[in-house]
Every structure is written in structure tokens, then in C-alpha cells.
Image (tube, rainbow, N blue to C red):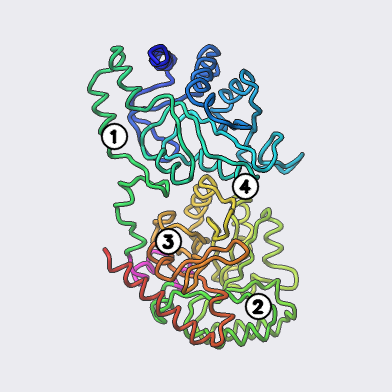
Amino acid sequence: MANFNEDVSNLVLRLYEIEAVKFGNFKMKIGANSPVYFDLRVIVSHPSIMKKISDLLYDFSIRNIKCDHLCGVPYTALPIASIISANNEIPMLIRRKETKDYGTKKLIEGQFKEGDKCIIIEDVITSGSSVLETAKDLRAHGLEVTDAVVLLNRQQGGEQILSEGNIKVKSLFTMTELIRILVKAGKIEPTIEKMVEEYLKSSQFHSSGILISDLKKPNERLITSFESRQHMASNPVAKNLFKLMCEKRTNLCVAADLTSSSKILDLFVKVAPYICIFKTHIDIVEDYTDEFINKLTSLAKEQNVVLMEDRKFGDIGNTVALQYTSGIYKIANWADLVTVHASPGPGVIKGIKNNMANRERGIFLVIEMSSEGNLLTSQYREAAMKMVLDESETVAGIVCQSRDVLSSPGIIQLTPGVQLNASKDGLGQNYNSPEDVVIKRGADIAVVGRGIIVSEDPAKEAKIYRDKLWEAYEKRISNK
């Protein structure tokens, strides 16, 4: 053990010499600033250090864990995993950051079978998000993931968060140990040790991936009334929605997932007094006619209800423009709002924006989904939110499941998957109670489908949901 500890200390000093460890003020991947930065990417220029890291990780942990495969978190840990794999004849898997649209289109490269055990190799854990995302993809392909072996544990909550995700972490050294080695060797002043110690205490991460200190700060969107937020919205449909929600005292959206036009119209008449949005999937209507859609739009205007077509556009801008304006549905002519996937990039928004023809229209960008095992990662969410803020005049809101994704009061959060008794269906859909979805998940508007449309009395059920959701909203803004 003495020789092992000496090897670790020597490794830390070598990493400091090649500037893999730096001190200053650095913005981290997770958005927070740090006085110390660990940049292992430089080791690719130092083969002897790569080999030493690989040997120590294997001897320290992997040797004693039964496994069938190794998987390095892309991209920094890949060289380390490759050396461990080759030196110790342990098969390796590669997880792509994204699926390619050519070739085999695989997300996990390598040969494996369901039930195989895979150890994740990582350079640094902070919040543990990269390891969790890697584990999620491996598990989705039938692999068993219970262990992660890392070089440095920054001691900011990542180990606990990964434990909650059923992943045990073994690290070669912690941030505290790294700093002590450098102080003892006279490489840094003891004052830096104190500064890092204070930083670690104040920069712990919650399981949501958000700094605990930030969770304690009020999210202005969550405590601001709809009446006030009406004046903060840039999109005209969002302004109108805030206004009618206050007038009708409702934040309920009904999802009319029905295939008959007469049943859709019948449902609308019953629930209209209690809702702010009526959401359709127009392409499942088996007897669609222009007369039907004209009747629906007329009723919506009479009852002060916004129509949303849940089309989830997700193609290149030109194709989306045609899907929005053409074909038998001509969605642009009647839908106040449409849902859009962010995956194609900003072009998908422009395709709709350029074809609104001066009509008051808006987009809800899909940031997260309520279905179990969905593939919308934290990186996707961050990129999508940038699109929201860049196009706030066109984007009225977002579809998401997490209360702290959105802080801008002028944007509306729509959250699906609501039932009076929270549960799960047989197709991977997760449900939340009205209070949970508004207070814990931060929904401004909650979507209810089967909870209302399959009930014996949709009007009565809609009123119950309306009352419970509005009560939760009032409770949320009162907790200032």
C-alpha cells in the first residue's frame, strides 16, 4: 500500500507539471465556476503518464471487479479505457455521443450480449452526469452497469448522485487528497487548500444536477403570477394565454387523443369552460374534413380556448414549412400553437416562423418527455433552451418535466403526464399528481388526456382537474 500511495503522489505531481491541474477561475461543463480545473486531455501527449494512470486504475479497482467489458466515457477517458483493455485483455465498448445517420447507426459499438457486465471508466466526476448518461445508454442496450472507476472525485456530490443511480464509484484520489499532495510538495500555498475546501463546501450538487445553493434561490418564474407574466411574454399567443388563464382561472390543457371528429367536438363542448388549451393529434383523426376543423376553431373562439396541434415537427426547415402550411390539414391556418422537436436545430423554428403570415401563432419546443427511457439528454436540453431564448418572439413555451429548466417568466412550461392518482401505464408513460406537476415539476400548464377523455363524465372530471391544478398554482406563487 505504501508503494501504491507513493505512486499516486508521484502521478499527481506529474499531472501538475504538465498543467493537467490548474488554479484560477474556471467555468466548468456544468456551468459553475471553480478555483481548480482538472484537464486530463493533455495526457495524450504524454504516453508514460497515460500508461501509469491505466495501470493504477486497473490495480486499484478493476482487477477486483468481475466484468465482461469496459466503456470509457467519451472522449477524455477513451484512451485510458483503451490501454486498460489492451493490457489486460478485457473487451471494450464505445458509446457514441450521438447516433450516426449512416452505416450501422449504432449508439454502442462493440460485441456484447444482454446481461453482460460493463465497468465505466471516467477521468473526473463532479455531478456524475456524464457517467449517468453513459450508464443509461448501456443499460438501454441490456448491459449491467454497477461500477464506475475514475481518476479524480471532485467531492461535489457526484459519488452520492451515482449511488442513487445504483452505480458504485471508486476513485484513485479525491480533490482533497490531490490538494494535500501538492501542498506537501510545496507546489501550491496552504491558502489555496483553504480556498478549495471552502469552495467544495459551497458547491455541492443535487441529484437533479443543479447546485444545491442554486436550488435555494427562488426561481422567479415559479413565484410570479400569470397576470404579471403576461407583460413579460414576447410571443403574442403566450400573452393571450396568460390573460385567459387568469380570466378563466385555469391552467388545464386537455389532450384530445381521439380518432373521431364528432367525438372530438363533443369532448370540446364538455370541457371548454374548464381549460385554457385544447390539444389535438390531427393526423389520427380518421374522418377529418375542413368542416370539422372550421367548427372546432369557431367553438374555440367562442369559448376562449387556445388550440394546440401536437405535431412535434422534427425535420429540416423546408420540409417542416410544407408540413405546417400544406397537405390536407393546413395546420398553419387554424392551430394557435404547435409542438416542435429541437433536434433538427434552429432551422425547424425558422421553417414555421417564416410561414406564420402575420397571424398570431406560437411554438412549444419539446425539451423533455414523460415517457420512460426517452433519449433527451442534458446536453440536448441545454442546446434546446438556447434556441428558446434566441427565438422568444416565436417560442411561446416549452414542453418539459423539470421545474428548474426554465427561469424566464415570459416563457410557459407545459408538462404532460398528469393523473389524479399518479401511476404508470403499460407503455412507459409516467404520471404525476396535479400538485406534483405544478409545484415539484414547475408546470405552468398541465396536460391531462386519458384521465378525462375516458371518464364517464369528462366535464365533471375536467372541473376537478381544473380546480386542483389552479389550487396548486396559487399555493406555488404564495410560497415566495
Magenta stretch: residue 230 in it?
Answer: yes
Q: Which is nearer the eye, 134 or 19?
A: 134
Check disc 2 and report the residue beneath it: 258
Earlier in the chain: of badge 2 and badge 3, it is: 2
* Mark 3 residue type: Arg
Dot placed on the residue nearer the N-terminal end, 4 or 2 = 4
251 drawn magenta: no
**Of the two numbered discs 4 and 1 in the rendering, the one whose residue sits closer to the viewer:** 4
Which numbered marker is on residue 441?
A: 3
Sooner in the amino-acid sequence: mark 3 or mark 1: 1
Query: What residue is shown at x 29% (from left), y 29% (from top)?
Result: 196
Residue receiving disc 1: 199
Report the span colored magenta: 224-241
Q: Which amino acid does label 1 sit on?
A: Tyr
Q: For the residue labelled by badge 3, is the local secondary structure a helix, a strand or a loop?
A: loop
Q: Can you give x and y, in whole percent of width and height, for residue 119 in the image?
A: 56, 33
x then y, percent, for residue 305: 51, 80
Q: For mark 2, does the 10 Å Cα neighbourhood hold few (<14), some (14 to 19), or many (20 or more) residues?
A: some
Residue type (three-letter) at the residue carrying disc 4: Ala
